[in-house]
Each structure stands twice: as structure tokens, then as C-alpha cells.
């Protein structure tokens, strides 16, 4: 099985790219399913076909699904939601508002992400293509299992034991709704499924992330930050897709400044994301809607290549902890020690290696630390960060 997740800033065209990739994979003979984790579904609009909550055939070898948010949340969050609603009502919040507040921010997208577990376990498809929510939401979802793991290990056993002791007393004194065992069972089941999705998505043998960008400054900066955090959490990125490049054949002088800007920003993309391969998609002369246009996009993106292959299979940066220091490791092959220079600019690290330069946005964990030293050996640059001396 192969799982590919596309993400990017809202509006860059990731839904179209996801749909085009799925269509191309199906044409190659793979049984493929494409679905979205975004609460604002737009896959149906991209294919120009009406979707529903059921998996349906879109083209030969290609299936799609736009999940019903209410059903999805009820399936994974229903029991927990019922308890939260009861608790809020005890606080005097009316039922309708309590129902709305009981669904935590991002819960819809998170529940949709859990569909991957079902697809994976059932093994009905060769390829799963995921049109992810915009990058901010996606990063929050991908990091959620790590946050929940701490809560489950530190607080869950205590909370469950305390509830057993307090339940009879609370009911007799104040009728406070202490969680029943089924609520804790539901939380534990959700946790186990999140652990499963974490295990699946961090498997570099079957899963990779792909970033969709436009040649625009704000889009590039957000994608750069996304790449840093994907690496931090151990998710592999095998491609950057640069969408909506104005073709050279467009000779209208109105677009001259746009073409110059795009050229400059494209160079920035090459600097920021090397050595990850960059695939280009031109700005088409009409809207990319419907299967014929999606086929054109897939052809422009992959030509004769297999869209499911790994285009890059290395983590471009790694963070480890040694005693009280953090080590940021960057693969930099084919250069000598003398060709490498390093500059720190607040939360950005600028690495010059020969004629190539990379600008790396540092994750939060390294922002408050200072660089103690760096060494280059066996094609890898290791930078040591330590706490600031008082």
C-alpha cells in the first residue's frame, strides 16, 4: 500500500493536485481512493461530481469519499461529546450551545484523518491519496497524538481512578456528572486509534507528505515552516509541487512583472527546499475542474512517471537530544568542510554549502537556544544548540 498526503497553504491548489495525482495513479492500474480531511470539502467540486458519505466510483480504478462531518464526529467523539454536553448543561449553558462547544476545534478534521486507519486495515486499495486541511490545521492534527500520549500516560489512570471514587459521592451530594466507564473507554479507544494513525503515517516505507506551493513569498515561508515541523515529528516529505507557474509562451506585457517575480520566487523555492525534488505545474488557460482538466494537470505534473513512487526518501533534517544539548543534523553530501558557512538570524538558520544555500526556519524547541558549535563529517553537518548561559 502507498499513502500520499498533500498539504499547503489554503488556496494553493492542493485539492486539484490531490485529485490529479489520484486520477493518474488509477490510470497506472492502482486501485486508488482519494478523500479530504478538510472540513470545507472541495474534492467534489474539483471532479465536478456529486459526492456523498459513501465511497463511490469516480473513474476506472478510482474511488472517492467526502465524509459526513456529523456522522464522523459522532462515530469517534459521540460518547465523549455526550458527557461534555451534560457537564456544560450543569453549568447553565443551553443545550444547543453546549452541543456546539462540545466539539473541540479541529475534531472534525482529526476524525477524518482516522479514516486512513480503516482504509489501511481493510487493505481494499493500493493507493490512498489524502487532500489535507491547510497546513496549520494539518500540523496540529499530526502533532495531536504526541500531546494526547502525555495526557494519557500522566493523567488518564489518575482521572479514571478518581472518577470511580468520586462518582457515588458526587451523585449523592450535587448530582455532578462524573464520567462513566464508557466515557473513559471511548477516550482510550480514541487514543489507541490516534497511536495507530501516528504509527502508519510515520512509516517511511509506505507514506510521504507532499507540499503544494505557489511562487509567492508568504506561501513559501509557510511551506518552509511546515517542512521543518514535518521533519521534527518524523514525517517524510518526498516532493514539492510548484503550482500555477506562468508559461514562457505567455507574451502579454501585462504579465511581465508577474513572470519576473515568479522567477525570483522560484529560485527561492529551489534554495529553501533542496534537495527535495520540485515538480512544476503551469497556470492553465482555464479552471482545473472536471476529469479532463485533472488529467491535463496530472500529465503536466508526472508525464510518464509513476505518481506513487518515492521521489525522495531521506529526512532532510533531524533533531536529537544529547544530555542538555540539542543536535540538528543536516545531510550535506558532495561538499567540503571549507565550502560550508553557517549564519543564525533570529529563528532562521542560513546554511551555505558550495554554491547552494538553504534557509531553515528553526522549530520552537531550538528558538531560545544558542549555537555552541558545528562539525561536518561523513556528509552530515551537525549543529549543537545549548541553553543560554545566565
Image: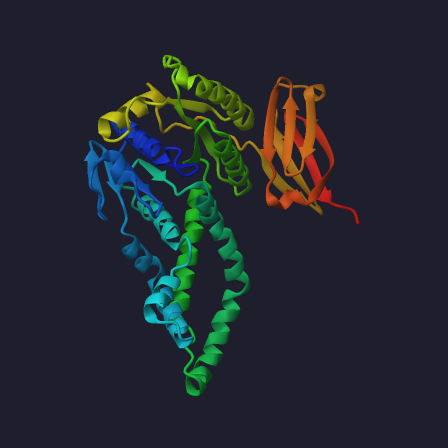
Measuring from the top left, give residue 245's x and y in whole percent: 40, 22
On screen, residue 140 above or below 236:
below
Q: Residue at x 72, y 41 (%)?
A: 370
Is residue 354 visible from the viewing direction of this image?
yes
Residue at 37% over, 34% down: 14
Which residue ends up furthest to the right in the rendered image? 390
Q: Is residue 45 above or below residue 143?
A: above
Q: Position of residue 330 (x, y in %)?
A: 61, 31
Q: Nearer the viewer, residue 314 or 390?
A: 390
Res 333 visible: no
Image location of residue 313, percent across then percent down: 48, 29
- 245 or 321: nearer the eye? 245
In the figure, is residue 94 to the left or right of 381? left
Please indicate whether residue 64 sits to the left or right of residue 120 in the image: left
Q: Is residue 302 left or right of residue 159?
A: left
Q: Quadrant of residue 55?
A: top left
Which residue of the protein is positioned furthest toward the front in this rendering? 254
> Of residues 133 and 23, which is closer to you in this image?
133
Residue at the bottom extreme, as displayed: 172
User: Residue at left 45%, top 52%?
Assistant: 195
Q: How is the image coloured?
A: rainbow
Q: Position of residue 309 (x, y in %)?
A: 39, 27
Q: Is residue 144 above or below residue 228?
A: below
Q: Which quadrant holds the N terminus?
A: top left
Q: Is residue 232 above or below residue 69?
A: above
Amino acid at each position: 500500500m502507498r499513502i500520499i498526503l498533500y498539504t499547503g497553504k489554503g488556496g494553493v491548489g492542493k485539492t486539484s493536485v490531490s485529485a490529479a495525482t489520484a486520477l493518474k495513479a488509477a490510470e497506472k492500474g492502482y486501485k486508488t481512493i482519494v478523500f479530504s480531511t478538510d472540513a470545507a470539502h472541495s474534492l467534489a467540486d474539483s471532479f465536478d461530481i456529486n459526492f456523498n458519505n459513501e465511497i463511490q466510483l469516480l473513474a476506472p480504478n478510482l474511488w472517492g469519499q467526502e465524509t459526513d462531518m456529523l456522522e464522523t464526529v459522532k462515530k469517534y467523539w459521540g460518547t465523549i461529546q455526550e458527557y461534555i454536553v451534560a457537564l456544560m448543561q450543569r453549568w447553565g449553558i443551553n443545550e444547543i450551545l453546549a452541543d456546539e462547544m462540545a466539539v473541540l476545534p479541529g475534531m472534525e478534521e482529526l476524525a477524518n484523518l482516522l479514516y486512513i486507519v480503516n482504509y489501511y486495515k481493510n487493505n481494499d486499495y493500493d493507493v490512498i491519496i489524502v487532500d489535507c486541511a491547510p497546513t496549520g490545521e494539518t500540523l496540529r492534527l499530526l502533532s495531536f497524538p504526541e500531546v494526547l500520549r502525555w495526557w494519557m500516560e500522566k493523567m488518564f489512570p489518575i482521572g479514571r481512578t478518581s472518577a470511580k471514587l468520586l462518582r457515588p459521592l458526587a451523585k449523592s451530594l450535587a448530582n455532578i456528572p462524573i464520567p462513566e466507564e464508557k466515557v473513559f473507554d471511548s477516550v482510550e479507544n480514541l487514543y489507541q486509534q490516534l497511536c495507530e494513525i501516528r504509527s502508519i503515517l510515520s512509516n517511511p516505507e509506505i507514506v510521504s507528505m507532499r507540499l503544494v506551493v505557489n511562487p509567492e513569498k508568504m506561501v513559501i515561508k509557510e511551506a518552509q515552516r511546515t517542512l521543518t515541523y514535518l521533519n521534527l515529528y518524523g514525517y517524510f516529505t518526498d516532493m514539492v509541487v510548484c503550482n500555477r507557474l506562468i508559461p514562457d509562451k505567455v507574451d502579454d506585457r501585462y504579465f511581465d512583472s508577474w513572470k519576473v517575480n515568479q522567477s525570483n520566487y522560484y529560485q527561492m523555492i529551489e534554495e529553501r527546499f533542496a534537495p527535495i525534488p520540485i515538480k512544476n505545474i503551469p497556470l492553465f488557460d482555464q479552471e482545473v475542474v472536471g476529469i479532463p482538466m485533472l488529467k491535463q494537470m496530472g500529465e503536466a505534473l508526472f508525464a510518464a512517471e509513476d505518481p506513487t513512487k518515492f521521489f525522495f526518501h531521506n529526512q532532510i533534517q533531524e533533531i536529537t537530544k544529547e544530555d542538555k544539548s540539542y543536535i540538528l543534523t543536516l545531510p550535506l553530501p558532495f561538499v567540503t568542510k571549507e565550502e560550508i558557512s553557517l549564519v543564525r538570524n533570529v529563528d532562521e538558520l542560513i546554511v551555505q554549502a558550495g554554491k547552494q544555500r538553504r534557509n531553515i526556519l528553526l522549530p520552537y524547541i531550538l528558538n531560545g537556544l544558542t549555537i555552541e558549535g558545528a562539525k561536518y563529517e561523513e556528509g552530515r553537518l551537525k549543529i549543537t544548540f545549548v541553553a543560554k548561559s545566565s
